[in-house]
Amino acid sequence: MTDRDEKTRQVFADSIKSLRGDEALATRYIFADWLDEQGCDDEAAAQRAWTREKQKALDWMADFAKESGRHCVDDGRDSPAYRELRDLNYGPGHRLPGHEARVEELYKRIEAAEVWVDITVEMLLEAARNWVETCNDVPDSWGDMGGDWFVQNGETGLRRRMGEPGAKERFWECYQLLTGEEVPEEKQGHVFSCSC
């Protein structure tokens, strides 16, 4: 493929990702025609196999992700400011004059060092896949067979959303539609926790 073809492919991918419902579905079909013209028959067939039900599942997952907040992937604990704060709070001289002002300044520096990302559909699917793969016979705090939790650092949106009536069932229904993987009911757990 030429650079122009790669740019065209990216425009289609970005459009599909940003559109919802029937508009996204129609764009997939146009993309499939373009892929046929490029000789990418398998990829074209995959785009045509995308159904309205899959699109609704993807839209639901996108809403779930967006409404669940963000995830802190680096909380600044490796920063020099964090180490200094730890020493100020627990080390010798932590009650020296001016301590409070310095502590406040360090908290601001740590906050500035934090790295936050939006929750994405891809993150949700990966967390669910990991849950299923690590599920065992020991019930967790929700009464589900426990797997490895996805811990949302800094916020509680995923845990809260998954606890809403019907959300867990819809989440797993969408997961199965989008991945084509069947998940036994006993493994359809809450998946998400917070760092609190």
Image (cartoon, rainbow, N blue to C red):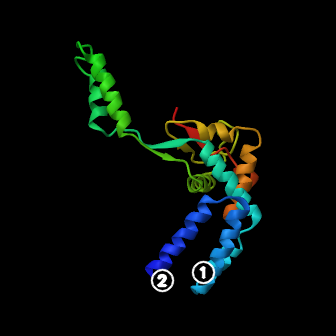
For numbered disc 2, what is the local secondary structure?
loop
Q: Position of residue 116 (x, y in %)?
A: 45, 43
Identify the secondary structure beneath mark 1.
Answer: helix
> Which residue in the protein does label 2 denote?
1
Residue in front for this viewpoint, 39 or 83? 39
Q: Residue 93, can we see it?
A: yes
Q: Residues within 10 Å of mark 2 (few under 14, many from 20)?
A: few
**108 or 20, which is in the foreground?**
20
Residue at x 47% of width, y 78% of height: 4
Residue 91 placement, left or right of 23 = left
Q: Earlier in the sequence, mark 1 or mark 2?
A: 2
> Which three-letter amino acid code belongs to the residue tagged 1?
Leu
Give the image location of residue 24, x and y in percent. 67, 64
Residue at image location 60% in from the left, 86% down from the top: 37
Q: Residue at x 23, y 12 (%)?
A: 97
Among the 4 quarters of the image, the one containing residue 29: bottom right
